[in-house]
Amino acid sequence: MSLAYSMTGFARIQGSVAEGVGFTLSLKSVNHRFLDLHMRLPAGCDALEMQLRKLLKEQLRRGHVEVTLQLDRQRQRTLQYDRSVVAAYVEAYRRAAEENQLPGDPDLSSILRMPGVFSSDGEDSELKPEQIEAAVLQEVEPLIASLRSMRAQEGAALVAELDACMVRIGAVADEVNTLRGDVRASYYERIRTRIAELTEGASISEERLLSEAAVMAERSDVEEEIVRLKTHVDHFRGLLAAGGELGKKLDFLLQELNRESNTLLSKTSGANTANGL
């Protein structure tokens, strides 16, 4: 027996690209008629996108799947100022003031905005797309497995709920079947009374009247509908037990179940059996 997968699921995994640079890769899946992949990747990851599409198409068959990759630079950068550069700017400031006979002391805020004053001891070298691709691809298989696991759990819950519904429908069908005789007798009596009212004063024999009422009551019998309803229920439950791709088959059976139920309701209108349906 194969599993019945839902198309709803989510999975996330984290990893490292380089020292101080991590990544988060997530998959979010919802219902869709076909496999529809939407990628949200950093710029320059075209080759990685092609690889991700290939791997996802090998593992998934349906669903709208959003793939999101985020890079996280974890390294803390420390700014330092270059004393020699600052001293040079101060000296140049004072010399310019003396040579031009201008008053004033060096302005620290202006000097600190000059090029070369500050430097960082934690600057990352530019990450190459190949680094990102290698780090991400080694985590893709467990990520897809996690998504499939969640979709399988969701599918199992849906199967259990649908199977419980089919059990209830089958029980109602059995109940209606036990009351068939009472329903037919009730329907026969209503028809006989109605025909008698419509033909009052006409020369129609009582035997003919009863015969016509019996024929109409026989046509109102719901045995065939009950048989078909229970057959559809058994088929539905069998498909649930078998697993695999069920959507289209179950949709067809639900339409048939609805049609048989509507026919039962119309034939048993006003009877107690309609309450269960």
Image: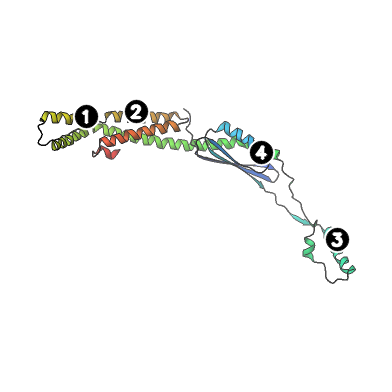
Q: CA distance from mark 3 to mark 4?
A: 47 Å
Q: Which residue is mark 3?
A: 88
Camera-side residue: 14 or 210?
Answer: 210
Q: CA distance from mark 1 to mark 2?
A: 22 Å
Q: Name which of mark 3 and mark 4 comes first in the sequence.
A: 4
Q: CA distance from mark 3 to mark 1?
A: 112 Å
In front of the other: label 3 or label 2? Answer: 2
In front of the other: label 3 or label 1? Answer: 1
Q: Name which of mark 4 and mark 1 comes first in the sequence.
A: 4
| Crowding at mark 2 (Cα within 10 Å: few <14, some 14-19, many 20+) | some
In front of the other: label 1 or label 2? Answer: 1
Q: Residue at x 35, y 35 (%)?
A: 258
Amino acid bearing label 1: Glu
| Crowding at mark 4 (Cα within 10 Å: few <14, some 14-19, many 20+) | few
Give the numbered dot on residue 218: 1
| Crowding at mark 3 (Cα within 10 Å: few <14, some 14-19, many 20+) | few
Give the numbered dot on residue 46: 4
